Amino acid sequence: MKKSIGAHTFVYPHPVFLVGSYDVDGKANVMTASWSGICCSDPPCVAVSLRKATYSYSCIMHSRAFTINIPSVEQMKKTDYAGIYSGKGQDKFPAAGYTAIPSQRVAAPCVDECSVVLECKLVHTLELGLHTQFVGEILDVQADESVLGENGLPDMLKVNPLLFSMSDRSYYSVGGWLAKAFSVGR
Amino acid sequence: MKKSIGAHTFVYPHPVFLVGSYDVDGKANVMTASWSGICCSDPPCVAVSLRKATYSYSCIMHSRAFTINIPSVEQMKKTDYAGIYSGKGQDKFPAAGYTAIPSQRVAAPCVDECSVVLECKLVHTLELGLHTQFVGEILDVQADESVLGENGLPDMLKVNPLLFSMSDRSYYSVGGWLAKAFSVGR
């Protein structure tokens, strides 16, 4: 039996990403974001929504680029820190315990400790209300060799990403491999 | 040591959602989608991207509404079916083994078997290339009482949603609860 629980932003799961950007002075900034997902295959694009009040909003509007970095379960505390505190009054990369390294493709910092990093050029902004959606074209993906699987691409269980649930404001881990998609339902 | 693996749509994880819509004749259609995520808190909005070639694309363009339904691990085969085959030549709800029930708020069908359903009114379309992004304002969330937690809201482990990884085209499950967000990093 279903019941109405109101107009909430509840989906299962939300991802947990770190968004890297440079401010107007070239200082690297990093922020945790979960209002995000892939939005196009060709050109490959990822969308992430930020509030105008965030420091990252002004950084991305200025630099027209960002990175999406995938933190692991081991990096949960650092990642939560980057979601609580603003980069406005502090150098947030070292404050969170992360290291900024330059992207090879775009004017945005990568999180060195994250095993998978998407380098994105801003191609659209969409004003939606409290949040502005930034759509970035993915120019390259950088991955640590330690998380690559047999096919030479990142392995979900080695990446070991964080998941987020809004309805209890909690982090979760990934469980096990289940089955091949585009196959098990034939 | 990081290496460049090219411009791919790899994030960890992708969600697995079922998109419900009505065609021009009022036939209920359902399709699996992973290029999706929350994109605004106020008004609450969710984005989902579909290729123009899909039947759901024409349905949503016509009806200006859709539902986002969260399938569980137990529904993996049905969900994979709904991602492989088109609704163009078949009645896909029964073909997949799902049941369509009308939304109370919008002109779109809900998947009765899914424990959490978001009822969405189309508010934006954004042409990105191969995919068109549909932004829906979430007018209500319907949830099965069986998946509600102590706070009266859906519990991630009871919802037991599917995860998807593009780099090995596989489904995964959610593991365990880790910690409270906006708290563990203080």
Image (tube, coloured by chain):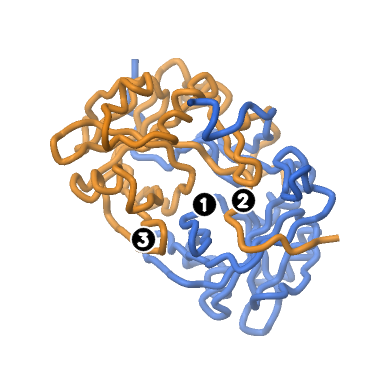
Chain colours: A blue, B orange
Looking at the rendered structure, the number of numbered marks drawn on it comes to 3
Q: Amino acid at mark 2?
A: Val
Q: Callout 1: residue from which chain?
A: A
Mark 1 lies on residue: A37
Q: Nearer the viewer, mark 3 or mark 1?
A: 1
On screen, residue B156 above or below A13? above
Tell which of A81 and B51 is nearer to you. Answer: B51
The crowding category of the residue bearing disc 3, from other C-alpha atoms within 10 Å (few below 14, some 14 to 19, many at least 20), is: many
Disc nearest the viewer among 3 and 2: 2
Asked whether residue B180 is in view, the answer is yes
Q: Position of residue B145 (x, y in %)?
A: 41, 17
**Residue found at x 58% / y 79%:** A63
Q: How many neighbours does mark 2 have within 10 angstroms: few (below 14), some (14-19), or many (20 or more)?
A: many
- Secondary structure at badge 1 equals strand
The x and y percentages for residue B173 are 62, 29
Reading the image, the residue beneath label 2 is B11
